[in-house]
Structure formats: structure tokens, C-alpha cells
Image (cartoon, rainbow, N blue to C red):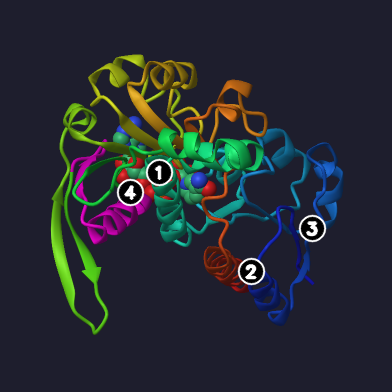
Amino acid sequence: MIKILANDGIDPIGKELLEKAGFQVDTETIPQDQLAEALKNYDAITVRSATKVRKELIDAVPNIKLIGRGGVGMDNIDVEYARSQGVAVVNTPAASSLSVAELVFSHLFTGIRFLQDANRKMPVEGATQFNNLKKAYAKGTELSGKTIGIIGFGRIGRATAKVALGLGMNVLAYDLYPSESEIILEFQGGKSVSIPIKTVSLDEVIAGSDFLSLHTPFAAKPILGAEEFAKMKNGVGIVNCSRGGTIDEPALIEALNSGKVAFAGLDVFDNEPTPLAEILTHPKISLTPHIGASTNEAQERIGTELATLIIEHFKK
Ligand code: NAD
């Protein structure tokens, strides 16, 4: 029987599919330093973003024939090395796009009405400072009619554009690879509208947007740093649901303190799982602990897709 360790868990639907196909699936989470020993009893491992599958681990367990990543980013796996050793590496790139895009708007709706600050202060000061807090949050804004700049116009960038267009926002997009594409909005009753989006330069996106959202892979050098913040509109809102490292965090804190950036919504951080204290406590930052794909719907899609890929691989 083929044995799979789902070290970062797998949706029950995916587990059931694998078990019905005759696989054994263990969902116990083995600590990173004990994985080399534990994996000697398995044929495959699945991970999300927490477990690292580096060269040393791959070398230690030549019995492992497949590494499955539930989700998109493969920066926690030495993919090229694994493949060079004949280990298959599969992932489920499209399954979480909509959930990540919707989280972008959770952060945007939070930032434009100061919810990140209100949720921290209301339990402490709400009873005595209600009217002062009301005054502090008097200058909210609307998203409709504003421009969102999307940096990285792949699956999640496009899903974000679709939600933005549905809210009546304008979209500016930049990608390393320029493109012209159609975003299709579907409405109740089966009607649909196709909206063409042509990518523009990074400078145009940075200078022309009221809100910016990052959707690139991990970048060795931050895409948004002090130089880019200086070119942005005053009072811009920034969301990062991509990967830590894409924003220069100290420069972001400075831009928030100066008022250049009105708010930030962060799902990803340089130092996961221990982000900077200044980030965690900043009144203008809305925080989530890397949960972009953490919806029931995305996890079901990820589990189903991953199970299907594993079954296809071993039944070949
Ligand atoms: P994708 O590959 O479909 O799109 C990424 C796009 O970024 C591509 O079009 C690529 O050309 C572009 N790109 C790469 N480097 C760039 C750069 N320096 N400047 C501009 N564009 C650049 O990937 P995706 O599925 O849209 O995922 C995007 C990001 O979201 C990834 O980093 C992924 O790891 C992350 N993600 C986060 C979560 C979460 O939980 N927060 C969940 C899923 C994915």
C-alpha cells in the first residue's frame, strides 16, 4: 500500500479520495527535525507552506517518490533538486486564487474604515471614549471609483482585478511579462461583461493608484521600498497577500508613520512566524497570519486537486 504523510494536513475530501483509491494517509504533523527519520516509512509527502522540503531531506529519504504542495508557492521545496533526483513535485496553483483575492478586499475594507484600530481600541476605550473614537474614524473612504494597482498580474492578480471591477474600481496592472487580457465579470441571470486590461509600467501603477496590491512570487529584492513609496499618491493603501520579502518592511513602517501610506494590510511577513513587533503593533496595519488560502472552499479544491494528482502519478 502506498503511504502518504500529509504533514501540514489535507482537507477531509482529499484524504477520502486517496483512501478510496487504496492509499494510506497520515495527517500527523512531524516536527521538521524528525522528518528525515519518519519519512523512511512513506512513499510521498504533502505540505502546505509550513514544512520545508530541502535538499538534505530529499537526500535522506530516497524512498520518497512524490512531494505534493497544497497551494501555489513552492519556495519551501527545493523543486529543481527534487526533480533532478527523479522525485515528482506537484502543486495546485489555481485552487486558492479567489480566496486570496477576497482576503485582499478584507484588508482593503478594513483599512479604509480603520477597523484594524477600532477593533483594538473599542474593547479598551469604547465605553469612555466612544465619541472621540468616532471622531478619529470620521474620514473613511469608499473603494468604488478609486484605482487599484495590481503588481503581478497572474492568477491571483487577475482574480483581484475581477473583484475590483465588480466593485466599480478602476484597475491598473503591472507584470514582469506585459500582457493584454480580458477579465470576464459574470452576473446573476447569466449575463457577462468582458473588460480588457492591458498591463502598464510599474511606475504608472505606483504613481496612479489609490491602493496597491502585490501578487508576485517571492522576490530576493523588495519590489516596494523607500524609492517606490516616494512616487506613490499621498494616503495610498497597500495590501500584501503574496510573499514576505516583496515589501521593504522598515520602509513601509516609515511611510506609515509619515502619513505617505494611510494603511497597510499584511498577510505575509519577512520573518514568519515571528514578524517584527513594530508591524504587529502598528495602528495602521491590519494583520492576518498567512491565511490567504484558508477558506473551506479553497481547502476543498486544494485537497481534491492534490489527491487527483497523487492518484494519477501512482496509478501511471
Ligand atoms: P502566478 O504565477 O499566477 O502569478 C504571479 C505573476 O507575477 C506572474 O504573472 C509573473 O509574471 C509575475 N511576476 C513575477 N515576478 C514579478 C515581478 N518582480 N514584478 C512583477 N510581476 C512579477 O501566481 P499566483 O497564483 O497569482 O500567486 C501569486 C503570489 O501569491 C505567489 O507569491 C504565491 O505564493 C502567493 N500566494 C499567497 C497565498 C497566501 O496565503 N497569502 C496563497 C496563495 C498564493
Q: In the image, residue 110 lies at what x, y percent?
A: 44, 45
Q: CA distance from mark 4 to mark 2?
A: 33 Å
Label 2, label 3: how far apart the Cα atoms are: 13 Å
Q: Is residue 174 magenta?
A: yes
> Which of the two discs, 2 and 3, labels the residue nearer the N terminus?
3
- SS category of the residue bearing label 3: loop
Quadrant in the picture for residue 282: top right
Task: Choose the circle earlier in sequence order: 1 or 4.
Answer: 1
Name the residue located 48 percent from the left edge and 39 percent from the top edge: 131
- The disc at residue 113 is 1
Q: What's under tag 1, amino acid-wise? A: Arg
Asked if residue 108 lies in the magenta stretch, the reply is no
**Residue labelled with disc 2:** 314
Residue under label 3, please give it: 42
Q: Is mark 2 within 8 Å of ligand 1?
A: no
User: Label 3, label 4: how many angstroms apart (C-alpha)?
Assistant: 37 Å
Mark 3 residue type: Tyr
The mark closer to the camera, 3 or 4, is 4
- Magenta residues span 155-178
Q: Which residue does the image show at 82% across and 42% down from the upper left?
A: 31
Residue pushed farthest bottom? 189
Residue 248, position as x, y percentages in the image? 44, 21
Residue position marked by numbered label 4 in the rendering: 157
Marker disc for residue 311: none
